[in-house]
C-alpha cells in the first residue's frame, strides 16, 4: 500500500463526503507532534499556530496526558453511563467548581456539537419553547439542531430546523450600519434591536446562545459589556443564557478563565458548553447547568461514549497541567505579545485590515489592497504561503477572509516571535503576488 499523501488524498475523495473540506492544495497528512510542533508524512516540521482548531490545548503529545490515557486504557476501557465511573465524577467535580454556576451539574458528551445539542434540549424543555436567539456570524455545530442556530451561511447546509431561530446583532460590527459606533453606542443599538425583536415575537423564547469570542466567525469579539446588557433584558423575560465556551474556555482568552467573564456583571450563564481543548485531542465535551435546568428532563437518558474513562483521564491530566503551569497567565502574556508583534510586522502590509484578539485567539482580517473588500483569495494564499514556511494557521470569518491563530497554550515567547516573522513573510509574499496581478 502506498504511503504517498497524494495517493491518500485520492482515496479520501473516493470514500469521504465532498463537504469535508481539506486545507491546502496538497492536503497535509500529519504523523506526529511534540510541544507546539507537528510533522507531516514527508518529514517536514511545522510550528502549529492552529492546534487542530484549538483541540491541542496544552501541547502535542503532552507526556502527562499520554501517560494518563495509556494507564487508563490498560485498566478498563468499558464505557457506559450505567455504572459509576471515578474519572467522570472527578472531572465533573473539578468543572463544577471552576464553572462558577451555583448548584451546577455536568453532562459529558463527545463533541461541541453534542454539548450544544444537549444544552438546546435542556433549555427548550425547561422553558417549554423551541424558540432560540442566536448571534449573527455564529457557529455552534453540525447536527440538525445546531446547524439551525448557526448564523453563518457557509456552515449551515439546511434551512430546515427543529428550532425557530432569531438572529441577534452583536458579534461583528466592523462593517455595515453599526460600523464606527463607540462601544456604548453599539451596545445600545444591539440592545434596542434585541428589545424590538422580543416585542415582535409571539410566545416565550427559551434561550440565547452566544460565543464570547466568535470562533469560526473569525475570532471577532463583541465589546465587553454587551452580553451583560443583553442579560438584563433576557432576565426580565425569563430567557436562559447559554455561553458556548467550546473555543473560549479554560483560560485561552488570557484575562479570564471563561469567555463570559469578560462580560461579568450578571454572573455566570445558566448553561455553559465546552469541548475541544479540554481533552487535548481526546473527545471530551459537555454541558454545565444549574440543577434546576439540568434536571428538567423527565425521561431517562444515556450516553455510551460521553464521559468514558479514557477521555476523562485525559481531561483530568490536561486540566491539572493547565492549572499547575498557569497557562491562562501564559495565554495572557504570550498572546498579548503575539498580538503586538503581529500588529507591528503587518503595519506596512496593505492586505491586512485588522489584527484583533484576546489572549491566544487572534484573528487577522485581509482585504484586497487599496480597498475595504474582504479577500478570501488572499487568506487562502497566505495559509498556503505560511505552510511553505513551516507555519500552520487557520482561516475563517465572514467571507472566509480572516486568518485564525490559536496555538497550544504552552507557546513560548521565542515561538511567538518566530511565528510572527514567518507569517509576516507569508503576508509580504502574497501582497507582492496580489500587487503584481
Ligand atoms: N461551538 C463552537 C463555538 C465551535 O467552534 C465548534 C467547533 N468548531 C462547535 C461548537 C462544535 O464542536 P465539534 O466540532 O466538537 O462538534
Image (tube, rainbow, N blue to C red):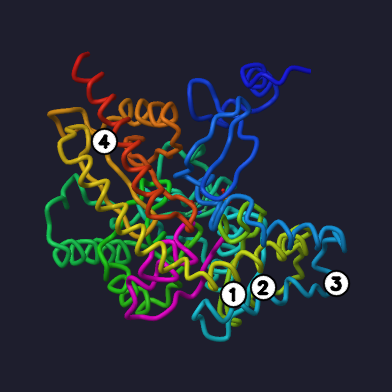
- Marks counted in the figure total 4
Residue 91 numbered mark, or none: 2
Q: Nearer the viewer, residue 175 or 389?
A: 389
Neighbour class for label 4 at 10 Å: few (<14), some, many (≥20)?
many
Q: Which mark is residue 95?
A: 1
Specify which label sits upstream in the sequence, 4 or 1. 1
Q: Earlier in the sequence, mark 1 or mark 3?
A: 3
Q: Is residue 426 left or right of residue 203?
A: left
The residue to which callout 4 is attached is 366
Is 53 on the left-hand or right-hand side of 225?
right
- The spot of residue 405 in percent (x, y) is 39, 46
Compare residues 88 and 326 and report the one nearer the observer.
326
> Quarter of the image containing the C terminus?
top left
Q: Helix or strand or loop: what does disc 2 sit on?
A: helix
Could you tell me how far apart the alpha carbons at marks 3 and 2 are, in whole angstroms?
A: 16 Å
Secondary structure under badge 1?
helix
Q: Are marks 3 and 2 in contact (CB under 8 Å)?
A: no
Q: What residue is pinned by disc 3?
A: 83
Q: Nearer the viewer, residue 121 or 255?
A: 255
Amino acid at each position: 500500500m502506498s504511503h504517498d499523501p497524494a495517493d491518500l488524498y485520492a482515496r479520501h475523495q473516493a470514500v469521504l463526503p465532498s463537504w469535508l473540506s481539506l486545507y491546502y492544495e496538497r492536503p497535509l497528512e500529519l504523523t506526529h507532534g511534540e510541544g507546539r510542533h507537528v510533522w507531516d508524512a514527508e518529514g517536514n516540521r511545522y510550528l502549529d499556530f492552529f492546534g487542530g482548531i484549538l483541540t491541542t490545548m496544552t501541547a502535542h503529545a503532552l507526556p502527562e496526558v499520554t501517560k494518563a490515557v495509556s494507564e487508563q486504557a490498560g485498566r478498563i476501557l468499558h464505557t457506559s453511563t450505567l455504572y459509576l465511573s471515578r474519572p467522570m465524577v472527578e472531572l465533573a467535580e473539578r468543572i463544577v467548581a471552576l464553572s462558577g454556576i451555583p448548584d451546577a451539574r455536568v453532562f459529558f458528551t463527545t463533541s461541541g456539537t453534542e454539548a450544544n445539542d444537549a444544552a438546546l434540549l435542556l433549555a427548550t424543555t425547561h422553558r417549554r419553547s423551541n424558540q432560540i436567539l442566536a448571534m449573527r456570524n455564529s457557529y455552534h455545530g453540525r447536527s440538525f439542531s445546531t446547524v439551525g442556530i448557526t448564523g453563518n451561511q457557509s456552515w449551515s447546509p439546511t434551512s430546515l430546523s427543529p428550532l425557530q431561530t432569531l438572529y441577534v446583532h452583536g458579534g461583528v460590527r466592523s462593517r455595515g450600519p453599526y460600523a464606527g459606533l463607540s462601544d456604548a453606542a453599539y451596545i445600545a443599538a444591539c440592545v434596542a434591536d434585541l428589545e424590538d425583536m422580543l416585542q415582535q415575537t409571539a410566545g416565550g423564547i427559551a434561550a440565547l446562545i452566544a460565543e464570547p469570542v466568535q470562533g469560526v466567525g473569525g475570532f471577532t469579539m463583541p465589546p465587553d459589556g454587551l452580553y451583560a446588557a443583553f442579560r438584563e433584558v433576557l432576565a426580565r423575560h425569563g430567557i436562559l443564557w447559554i455561553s458556548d465556551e467550546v473555543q473560549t474556555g479554560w483560560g485561552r482568552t488570557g484575562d479570564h478563565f471563561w469567555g463570559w467573564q469578560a462580560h461579568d456583571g450578571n454572573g455566570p450563564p445558566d448553561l455553559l458548553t465546552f469541548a475541544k481543548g479540554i481533552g487535548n485531542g481526546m473527545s471530551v465535551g459537555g454541558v454545565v447547568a444549574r440543577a434546576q435546568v439540568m434536571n428538567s428532563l423527565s425521561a431517562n437518558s444515556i450516553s455510551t461514549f460521553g464521559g468514558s474513562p479514557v477521555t476523562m483521564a485525559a481531561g483530568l491530566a490536561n486540566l491539572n497541567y493547565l492549572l499547575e503551569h498557569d497557562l491562562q497567565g501564559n495565554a495572557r502574556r504570550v498572546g498579548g505579545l503575539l498580538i503586538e508583534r503581529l500588529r507591528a510586522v503587518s503595519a506596512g502590509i496593505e492586505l491586512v485590515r485588522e489584527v484583533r484578539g484576546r489572549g491566544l485567539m487572534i484573528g487577522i482580517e485581509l482585504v484586497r489592497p487599496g480597498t475595504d473588500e474582504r479577500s478570501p483569495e488572499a487568506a487562502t494564499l497566505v495559509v498556503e504561503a505560511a505552510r511553505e514556511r513551516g507555519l500552520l494557521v487557520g482561516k475563517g470569518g465572514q467571507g472566509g477572509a480572516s486568518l485564525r491563530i490559536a496555538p497550544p497554550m504552552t507557546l513560548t515567547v521565542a515561538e511567538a516571535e518566530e511565528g510572527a516573522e514567518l507569517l509576516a513573510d507569508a503576508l509580504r509574499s502574497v501582497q507582492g503576488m496580489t500587487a503584481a496581478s
